[in-house]
Amino acid sequence: MPNEPGLNQETIIARCRCWIESTVVAFNLCPFARKPFENTQVRYVVSRAENTDQLLDDFHDELKLLRSTDIAELETTLLIHPYVLNDFFAYNDFLSVIDMNIRQCNYQGEFQVASLHPAYQFADADIDAAENYTNRSPYPVLHILREESLSRALLGYARPERIPERNIRITEELGKEKLSSILSNCMQIKVD
């Protein structure tokens, strides 16, 4: 992901919203995403962190905010961090630090993080596999989810364990070129 000088928060958020709407929601890749997205219960935060310590501080701020805010008002947060962890493997390694922090700060059972990154690659997938686009976002993102919301959503969803294989099938049918094009189109958005 190129660091674009002078890029404003509104543009970064608009690109992420575009990707969620045109990929995640449009193709129902996450069957739990549509409702909070359409009900504007998603918080988009652009971190200015330039190192992982600063990012951890922002992460903890968001956990505290989510904990203190009613779920009807705010369900989830996308912590977008365009200036740190642009290398996918460094980002992926950092997820273990995030998990450890959730446990150490007594957020276990309350929150979990879904990983989104421009160079996302599933462990058993080829780098060019279409399935990687389920998690290929415009910028690196820590998506903070409330476990309560996930549990409730899973109750109403038949066979949630099949979501990954369903997504593989959908992305393979759509093809890497189409998914890449959608992401590329979102990256063309500029907000003044």
Image (cartoon, rainbow, N blue to C red):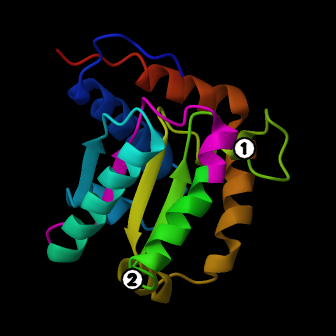
On the image, the x and y values in percent for residue 158 come to 58, 84
Instruction: Give the quarter of the figure containing the C terminus.
Output: top left
> If you read the primary sequence from the N terminus, does the residue marked by circle 1 or circle 2 appear first?
2
Q: Is residue 92 left or right of residue 108?
A: right
On the image, the x and y values in percent for residue 51 come to 44, 37
Above or below, 192 against 90 in this view is: above
Instruction: Give the quarter of the figure containing the N terminus.
Output: top right
Tag 2 residue: 106
* Camera-nearest residue between 175 and 119: 119
Tag 1 residue: 121
Q: Is residue 143 left or right of residue 95?
A: left
On the image, the x and y values in percent for residue 133 come to 63, 41
What residue is rendered at 24% in x and 29% in y?
A: 9
Membership of 88 in magenta stretch: yes
Q: Secondary structure at mark 2?
A: loop
What residue is rendered at 52% in x and 81% in y?
A: 157
Amino acid type, label 1:
Gln
* Camera-nearest residue between 74 and 84: 84
Q: Secondary structure at mark 1?
A: loop
Query: Counting other residues with Cα less than 10 Å from the Cα at mark 1, is it few (<14), some (14-19), or many (20 or more)?
Result: many
Distance, label 1 to label 2, CA atoms, is 30 Å
* Camera-nearest residue between 6 and 119: 6
On the image, the x and y values in percent for residue 186 come to 42, 26
Query: Can residue 10 be seen from the camera position used here?
Result: yes
Q: Quadrant of residue 149?
A: bottom left
Query: Can residue 71 be seen from the camera position used here?
Result: no
Q: Which residues are magenta?
A: 71-93
**Front label number (1 vs 2):** 2
Above or below, 128 against 31 in this view is: above
